[in-house]
Image (spheres, coloured by chain):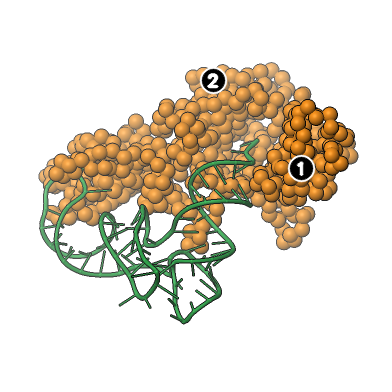
RNA sequence: GCGGGUGUAGCUCAGUGGCUAGAGCAUCACGUUGCCAACGUGAAUGUCGUCGGUUCGAAUCCGAUCACCCGCUCCA
């Protein structure tokens, strides 16, 4: 199975199109076609139903410390600019980069350190990626640059301490971290991973705002509103599905890394004392959800981040990853991240942007000694009216990509098998084995042949089922071909009206995966299909 | 952003040395057809990714540009 055949099927059958295709397309943007929009809606609705609307808040779910409540939310895409300053996105997603003309490598301007060094009458500023071994790196590069051997290491005359490249004005004497010649670095160029826009008619910096790079912040800033309006006690989860935008430098791999994408996020607020248990609960629950929706064990892994990868305030982060066909053998792409975020986000919106490097977390200060980005000043802590305990809730964040999940389901469903044709000869069949809950079309209705009143009966069955499910009517061509067309669309059931229908009001239901047929009464069709979809 | 590759019908792809554009599949119509990619007959489909240049003449040569794929880079 290759990605190409999946991409080709998606286009051919109307799952996915390139955005603005007639104008040549636009990198990182994709449209969902008639089948794709149904599939993606089903993915989102399955998630919303399983996580929110059908959530059993009376019972203690397996692995959970206690019952919990779930609510939904739908926030705006453009929010107050201060939201992104306090959340840290503004600083993090807004980088200056320098390119090396010689090695074609790119570095973050503020992540290169360097020192002046002199030898053989020449002086350069030798740079290295900031880190513990930067001096070792610099020495190596300096020796190479001056064409010196290790034993002549004392010929290097270092001048001053290691300083950040941002302190250097001209790059003429700067030696790039991997370059052989000095002066190959370009001037720093601005990269903004957040889409910028302007609120109001005046397009000055006063009205500058950003399209959200994640849906999560809308939940944090509404935490108090939801709590006050619903009378819930913690633990409480707040869910949101919505579009987010990131101006990725290199969108690639079909819809996997898009610039406009949809997220399905939960921010789960709980007592810090129980947060570890809740983290484990959500991690396992979310993994199981993908299993239940049809992703096989061999293609799905949970990857716990190592301690070094974690922000120090986080007790754990786990990625749920899928073996996409475009990844190298043994590599996986992220579907969802489940993160323990502690009280970082709520505190950020109370106090202002926190310095992630501090422990315990403290406010990040600007050069003037004042808070770099000032918070709302609102109290977002929670008082338990039963115990009278007051605390800032800890947050567990299961953050899923709706487009990535949809893509994973498409990849997982794509199957080529061998089935006999009407002469018994084996033929390759392309079939999308989507979970019936996710399938864009639940059932197709066919008259076996276009005569003897079969189309009339089939149309009646079609119109009746249409009230309950997304169904499709097809009378064109031989019935075998119609079955195969539905296989490619992922339709799990095909209902055929035949000669016997006219005698006893029964039809056959054909199963996409097993090709088996059962005969049921027309009146029972709806119930049988419903049971199978949910079953 | 850099390097390499690709771009021709809905899909998969031919194509020539510069002159009127091709196949298979798919699609549509009619007839036949009684359960897994049927058959017959007929039909429709492209400014050859886009823009520009060279030329009497460009899908073909040159330049630019856009998109996709691969490798770097990046990836809260």
Task: Give the letter of the green chain.
Answer: B
Q: Quadrant of residue A385?
A: top right
Residue situated in front as seen by the camera: B73 or A20: B73
Q: Position of residue A210 (x, y in %)?
A: 68, 49
Query: Would residue A378 be visible to someone looking at this image?
Result: no
Q: What is the tally of numbered marks visible in this picture?
A: 2
Q: Residue at x 73, y 53 (%)?
A: A208
Task: Give the letter of the orange chain.
Answer: A
Q: Quadrant of residue A344?
A: top right
Q: CA distance from mark 2 to mark 1?
A: 55 Å
Q: What residue is shown with label 2?
A: A64
Q: Residue at x 67, y 21 (%)?
A: A272
Q: Position of residue B32 (x, y in %)?
A: 10, 58
* Neighbourhood count class around disc 2 (C-alpha, 10 Å): few under 14, some 14–19, many 20 upward: some
Q: Is residue A520 left or right of residue A155?
A: left
Q: Nearer the viewer, mark 2 or mark 1?
A: 1
Chain under disc 2? A
Residue situated in front as seen by the camera: B7 or A263: B7
- Comes first in the chain, label 2 or label 1: 2
User: As displayed, is residue A531 above or below residue B21?
Assistant: above
Chain under disc 1? A
Q: What residue is shown with label 1?
A: A175
Q: Residue at x 72, y 61 (%)?
A: A201
């Amino acid at each position: 199975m290759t990605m190409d055949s999946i991409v080709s099927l998606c286009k051919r059958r109307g799952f996915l199109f390139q955005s603005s295709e007639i104008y040549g397309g636009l990198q990182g943007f994709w449209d969902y076609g008639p089948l794709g929009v149904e599939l993606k809606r089903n993915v989102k609705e399955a998630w919303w139903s399983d996580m929110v609307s059908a959530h059993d808040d009376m019972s203690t779910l397996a692995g959970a410390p206690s019952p919990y409540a779930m609510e939904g939310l739908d926030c705006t895409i453009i929010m107050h600019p201060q939201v992104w300053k306090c959340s840290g996105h503004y600083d993090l997603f807004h980088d200056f980069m320098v390119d090396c003309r010689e090695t074609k490598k790119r570095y973050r301007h503020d992540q290169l350190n360097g020192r002046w060094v002199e030898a053989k009458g020449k002086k350069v500023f030798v740079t290295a990626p900031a880190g513990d071994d930067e001096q070792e790196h610099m020495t190596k590069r300096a020796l190479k640059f001056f064409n010196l051997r290790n034993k002549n290491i004392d010929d290097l005359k270092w001048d001053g301490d290691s300083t950040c490249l941002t302190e250097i004005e001209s790059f003429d004497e700067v030696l790039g971290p991997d370059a052989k010649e000095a002066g190959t670095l370009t001037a720093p160029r601005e990269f903004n991973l957040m889409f910028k826009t302007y609120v109001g008619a005046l397009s000055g910096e006063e009205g500058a705002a950003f399209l959200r790079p994640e849906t999560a912040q809308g939940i944090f800033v509404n935490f108090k509103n939801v709590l006050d309006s619903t009378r819930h006690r913690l633990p409480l989860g707040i869910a949101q599905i919505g579009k987010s935008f990131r101006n990725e430098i290199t969108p690639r791999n079909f819809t996997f890394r898009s610039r406009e994408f949809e997220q399905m996020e939960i921010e789960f607020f709980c007592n810090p004392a129980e947060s570890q248990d809740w983290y484990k609960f959500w991690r396992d629950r979310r993994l199981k959800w993908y299993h239940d929706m049809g992703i096989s064990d061999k293609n799905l892994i949970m990857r716990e981040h190592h301690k070094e990868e974690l922000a120090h305030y986080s007790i754990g982060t786990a990625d749920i990853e899928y073996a996409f066909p475009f990844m190298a053998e043994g590599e996986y792409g992220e579907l969802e991240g489940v993160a323990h975020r502690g009280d970082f986000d709520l505190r950020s919106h109370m106090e202002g942007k926190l310095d992630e490097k501090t422990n315990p977390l403290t406010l990040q200060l600007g050069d003037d000694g004042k808070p770099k980005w000032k918070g709302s000043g609102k109290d977002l802590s929670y008082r338990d009216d039963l115990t009278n305990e007051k605390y800032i809730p800890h947050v567990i964040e299961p953050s899923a990509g709706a487009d990535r999940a949809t893509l994973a389901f498409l990849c997982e469903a794509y199957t080529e098998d061998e089935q006999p044709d009407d002469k018994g000869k084996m033929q390759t069949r392309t079939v999308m084995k989507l979970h019936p809950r996710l399938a864009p079309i639940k059932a197709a209705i066919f008259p076996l042949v276009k005569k003897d009143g079969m189309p009339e009966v089939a149309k009646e069955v079609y119109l009746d089922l249409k009230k309950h499910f997304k169904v499709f009517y097809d009378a064109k061509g031989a019935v075998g071909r119609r079955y195969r067309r539905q296989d490619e669309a992922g339709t799990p059931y095909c209902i055929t009206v035949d000669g016997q229908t006219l005698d006893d009001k029964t039809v056959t239901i054909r199963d996409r995966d097993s090709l088996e047929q059962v005969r049921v009464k027309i009146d029972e069709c709806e119930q049988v299909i419903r049971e199978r979809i949910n079953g």
